[in-house]
Amino acid sequence: SQTIHQWPATLVQPVGSPLSLECTVEGTSNPNLYWYRQAAGRGLQLLFYSVGIGQISSEVPQNLSASRPQDRQFILSSKKLLLSDSGFYLCAWKGSRQGTAFFGQGTRLTVV
Amino acid sequence: AQKVTQAQTEISVVEKEDVTLDCVYETRDTTYYLFWYKQPPSGELVFLIRRNSFDEQNEISGRYSWNFQKSTSSFNFTITASQVVDSAVYFCALDTGTASKLTFGTGTRLQVML
């Protein structure tokens, strides 16, 4: 069966520090991968999605970036974190464009 | 453009009451998919149900039921005999398949009290 792993679960980082969040999927090949962010008490905002290795689409301009170095690996990065980057980050995968999205357990990021 | 509206920000009920969470969607696509997800306090988004636009049959799963009506662009979710474990934030979402992404509503926080 397919599983999705996301880490770390929680992270406290100072303003201006770099960020790297990792997400991997097991049990499937060529998944569509997504990064969402949920600000405190709010809905989910799509940040990036990828339909294949090296293919990244950005939904919201910001100081974050994403990469997909391997088929089932999706990384969210920042060179310099801002206070406004605090939030709950969720990785998700779909088996196809019409598939159902399944989510990882999330990373709670606090920028101080 | 796609849009999902969950007008109820927060609902509080007493255990064993029935509760309905509303979801209204907008899309110009004729083929689309609707979802409900549950977000417990732990934060993980748990998939509950998926409905295809060409299938308006309502569905029941235990205490959960879903009412899909294309005529009113609604996909409502009812919990019968609510329990404390149902306390969570519930999200309705829309996927048209073309942009390969989900559009979420802002969520409804359900609190079930003893």
Image (cartoon, coloured by chain):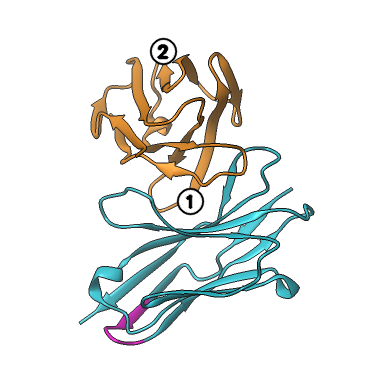
Residue at 38% across, 61% down: B89
In the picture, measured across the screen, residue B64 lies left or right of residue B76, that is left
Q: Are marks 2 and 1 in contact (CB under 8 Å)?
A: no
Residue that appears at 36% across and 27% down: A23
Residue range in magenta is: B12-17
The residue singled out by tag 2 in the image is A79
Q: Give the quadrant of the C terminus of chain A.
A: top left
Q: Residue at x 48, y 46 (%)?
A: A44
Q: Is residue A111 visible?
A: no
Give the chain of mark 2: A
When the figure is inspected, residue B47 is found, relative to residue A106, above or below; the finding is below
Q: Is residue A72 left or right of residue A96?
A: left
The numbered disc on residue A43 is: 1
**Chain A, hue in figure:** orange
Q: Is residue B15 magenta?
A: yes
Q: Colour of chain B?
A: cyan
Q: Name the chain letter of the residue that bears numbered label 1.
A: A
Q: The residue under label 1 is which amino acid type?
A: Gly
> Which residue of the protein is positioned furthest toward the bottom in this rendering?
B17
Percent of width and height locating residue B15: 26, 83
Name the mark on residue A83.
Answer: none
For this view, does A44 lie left or right of residue A22? Answer: right
What crowding class fits label 2: few (fewer than 14 Cα within 10 Å), some (14-19), or many (20 or more)? few
Residue visible at 65% across and 70% down?
B56
Q: Amino acid at mark 2?
A: Lys
The answer, for residue A37, to whether it is visible in the render is: yes
